[in-house]
Amino acid sequence: MNIRQLAESDLATTLEDSVGGFGWDITVIDPHYNSATITGQSDDIAQVIDPDTGAIVSGRLATVALRLSTLTTNEIGIPKGIANEKQKPWVIKFNDINGNAHKFKVIQSNPDRALGVVTCLLEGYK
């Protein structure tokens, strides 16, 4: 097994371990309403950096990181941002640490096909 294959295999522990690691249940829903609940990592923070000034401002930055092989196994595909507001978006749902449910749409998808992970930038969605 080469180092890339080993790194992808290690994602089962570093990305998806929900017992001793940071793994968290995340529901992924494609634009056709196919869904899968898989384990990945999520962020939802309230401070962001204004790119024009470099100042810390109050805002919301939510992301998820998901293993590509797990998405494939669950036959859900790789989430992606859909700019056309008339089309259904990819939707991501997860609970915060206190059990409160949150729903987002994918606004940007950054797959790393060398390592086997996709990071999605999210925006609140109703």
Image (tube, rainbow, N blue to C red):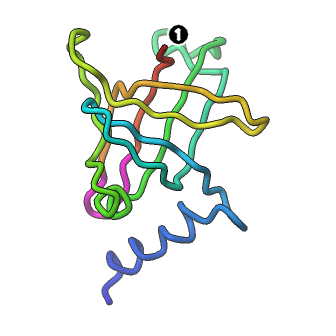
Residue at 25%, 32% in the rendered image: 32
- The kind of residue on which mark 1 rests is Thr
Q: Nearer the viewer, residue 124 or 118?
A: 124
> In the image as oriented, which residue stretches furthest toward the front?
33
Residue at 67%, 21% in the rendered image: 46
Q: Is residue 8 above or below residue 62?
A: below
x, y percentage for residue 61? 55, 25
Please state if 110 lies on the left or on the right of 124 as rendered: left
Which quadrant would the N terminus be assigned to in this image?
A: bottom left
Q: Nearer the viewer, residue 49 or 36?
A: 36
x, y percentage for residue 2? 31, 85
Magenta highlight on residue 123: no
Q: Quadrant of residue 33?
A: top left
Q: Quadrant of residue 58?
A: top right
x, y percentage for residue 112? 30, 54
User: Which residue bears the numbered disc 1?
Assistant: 53
Category of crowding for the residue at label 1, using alpha-carbon neighbours closer than 10 angstroms: few (below 14), some (14–19), many (at least 20): few
> Which portion, as a residue range, is magenta?
112-118
